Image (spheres, grey):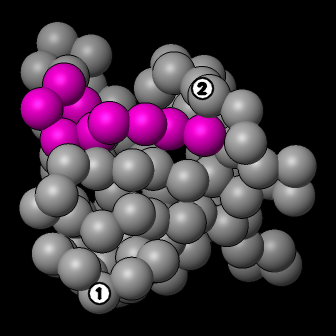
Amino acid sequence: MKDITVKELMEMVGGDIYQAESVDRYGIYIRMGQVSFIYDEDMDELAFRSRSAGEISLNVGSSIEYIGIGEDGTIVIEFNSQVSVIEIRKMEGLV
């Protein structure tokens, strides 16, 4: 797993569509399909925007402890103890 910054995450995901799901059910459980990402640098907030489930915004400085990418391209975001670890995978074949 390679550490990446929020800026690197945003460059990597671009306008592509992803699936985001909590790895476990500790804290807040998240499962969102067809997700895109928005980062507000001024507010230091990362938003997960889903076509079907609305939007979740998290403050990067106080919520996110680690962002990494695996060899298979899976992105892992580790949060403080209030939110479960989330895996993000690119969704193929969506128009």
| Relative to 34, 58 lies left or right | left
Q: Residue at x 73, y 42 (%)?
A: 1
Q: Which residue is mark 1?
A: 25
| Relative to 32, 63 lies left or right | left
Mark 1 or mark 2, which has the lower sequence index?
Answer: 2
Above or below — where is 58 with respect to 5?
below
The reply to whether residue 51 is in sight is no
Image coordinates for residue 74, horizontal then vertical, percent: 71, 58
Q: Residue at x 23, y 80 (%)?
A: 26
Element at label 1: loop
Q: Which residues are magenta?
A: 60-68
Q: Which residue is mark 2?
A: 4
- Front-lying residue, 48 or 72: 72
Element at label 2: loop
Q: Hey, which quadrant is residue 17 in on the image?
A: bottom right
- Disc 1 residue type (three-letter): Arg
Above or below — where is 23 with respect to 47?
below
Is 95 included in the stretch rendered in magenta?
A: no
Q: Residue at x 48, y 56 (%)?
A: 36
